[in-house]
Image: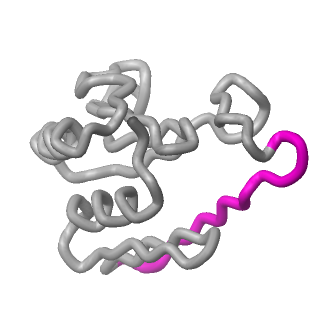
Amino acid sequence: MGLDADQRRNTLNKHISPGSRICADQNEWRLTTPQGHTSTSLNLAKGEHAARPHDRCSPGLHHFAWRVETQDDVDGFHDLLKDIGAEILDAPADYPPYASGKGYYAVSFADADRLRLEDA
C-alpha cells in the first residue's frame, strides 16, 4: 500500500527536524528549514501514459531522498511506515557505497504512484 498526498505530507512533517516544515501546494513541495528554503516541483502525467505507474528504471526520476540526523531517526520513521501500512521497499540498513563510504543508513518506501522515497 502506498501513501496518498495527505499521508506523505503528514508523515514527513512528523519526521523532519524541529523548525522545519513541508508544504504541498498543487505540484510543488516546499521544505523550509532553519537553514533556508528548498522546493521541488513534480508535475502530473498527462495523455495516454497518465495512468501508468511510476517505473524507476525508465528515463526520468529514480527516487527522492532526504537526510535526517541519526540512525535512530531512520529506525523511528521505519516504525511509522509499518504502522501506517506503507509499502517498504528496503528496510533500514547501512549502504557503504553511498556518501563516499562515510555512513549512509536509509529506509525506502513507495508512495501511491510507486515513486521510491528514501529517508537517510
Which residue is situated farthest in the right direction here? 47
Does residue 55 belong to the magenta stretch?
no
The total number of labels drawn is: 0
Colour mode of the rendering: one colour
The quarter of the image holding the N terminus is top left
Q: Position of residue 32 (x, y in %)?
A: 40, 77
Front-most of residues 107 and 70: 107
Vertical placement of residue 86 versus 18, above or below: above
Q: Is residue 95 left or right of residue 78?
A: right
Instruction: Indicate yes or no whether the magenta region holds residue 39.
Output: yes
The quarter holding residue 65 reads top left
Identify the residue at image location x=18%, y=73%: 18
Q: Quadrant of the C terminus?
A: top left
Q: Nearer the viewer, residue 2 or 19?
A: 2
User: Which residue is found at the position 40% from the left and 51% from the top?
Assistant: 66
The percent coordinates of residue 84 (x first, y second) are 23, 45
The residue sitting at 47% across, 43% down in the picture is 111
Range covered by the magenta-colored residues:
35-49
- Horizontal side of 57 relative to 99 (left or right) equals right
Given residues 99 and 114, the one toward you in this image is 114
Q: Eyeballing the image, is 39 above or below 1?
A: below
Image coordinates of residue 35 in percent, x first then y, are 36, 76
Which image quadrant for residue 99?
A: top left
At horizontal 66% and vertical 35% (from top left) the residue drawn is 53
Left or right: residue 81 compared with residue 73 = right
Residue 102: quadrant of the picture: top left
